Image: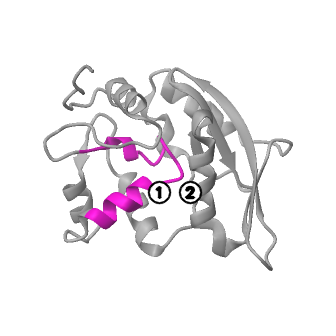
């Protein structure tokens, strides 16, 4: 998989896969062992579009399965999915994006496991209470699912709202963490 901007060599991230209870996670780390991407194997095209948007100015990204992956990241993710909810808190992350997006993503990491915030609360905590829609858009472009816990953001009425990995994954993650929310109505 490759996204390339003109005149700059692409960043190269080590790509690996991790079996989880909610599907195969795609994990990309940089040379420093920082998590750059966590997405789902069944959402590769969406992931690719997101990487294109946020890394275009950096020369793009090449995800390479032949580069050694950062095992501490994988070990912490395995521990999280096995029930150690705090295991992901120490995972170092890094991402491109606008200063506003990066601020929103940093604030997302402050939502404790087992808790949820509304988009309004997230906007306020990001210092932009009037920018609820922009905060929602930044949340939707988060390239580091689970660890930058965009799944912990719910609607103002407590209901589940969009999640790039799909609402069933969001529901599973919130149940796994013991968070309160309104369950989706059966179809």
- Which residue is at the front of the view, 60 or 99? 60
Provide the secondary structure element on which disc 1 rests: loop
View extreme (right): residue: 66
Q: Give the residues drawn in magenta, as a range.
A: 133-154
The answer to whether residue 140 is seen in the rendering is yes
List x then y, in percent, for residue 117: 24, 47
For residue 37, say whether it is visible.
no
Q: Residue at x 56, y 25 (%)?
A: 23
Residue 104 picture quarter: bottom left
Instruction: Tell me the SS state at disc 2.
Output: helix
Q: Where does residue 136 sit, x and y in percent of width and height?
A: 32, 58
The residue where tag 1 is placed is: 141
- Neighbour class for label 1 at 10 Å: few (<14), some, many (≥20)? many
**Gap between marks 2 and 1, in whole Å?**
6 Å
* Residue picked out by circle 2: 50
Residue under the point 25% across and 69% down = 131
In the rendering, which numbered label is found on residue 163?
A: none
């Amino acid at each position: 998989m490759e996204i390339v901007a003109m005149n700059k060599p692409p960043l190269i991230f080590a790509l690996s896969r991790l079996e989880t209870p909610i599907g195969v996670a795609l994990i990309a780390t940089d040379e420093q062992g920082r998590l750059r991407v966590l997405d789902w194997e069944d959402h590769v095209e969406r992931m690719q579009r997101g990487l294109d948007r946020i890394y275009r100015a950096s020369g793009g990204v090449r995800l390479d399965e032949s580069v050694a992956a950062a095992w501490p990241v994988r070990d912490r993710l395995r521990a999280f999915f096995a029930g150690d909810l705090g295991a992901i808190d120490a995972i170092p992350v890094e991402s491109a994006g606008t200063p506003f997006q990066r601020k929103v993503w940093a604030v997302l990491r402050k939502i404790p496991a087992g808790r949820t915030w509304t988009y309004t609360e997230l906007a306020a905590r990001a210092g932009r209470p009037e920018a609820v829609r922009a905060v929602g858009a930044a949340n939707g472009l988060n390239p580091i699912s689970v660890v930058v816990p965009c799944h912990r953001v719910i609607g103002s009425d407590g209901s589940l709202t969009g999640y790039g990995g799909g609402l069933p994954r969001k529901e599973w993650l919130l149940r796994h963490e013991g968070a309160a929310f309104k369950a989706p109505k059966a179809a």
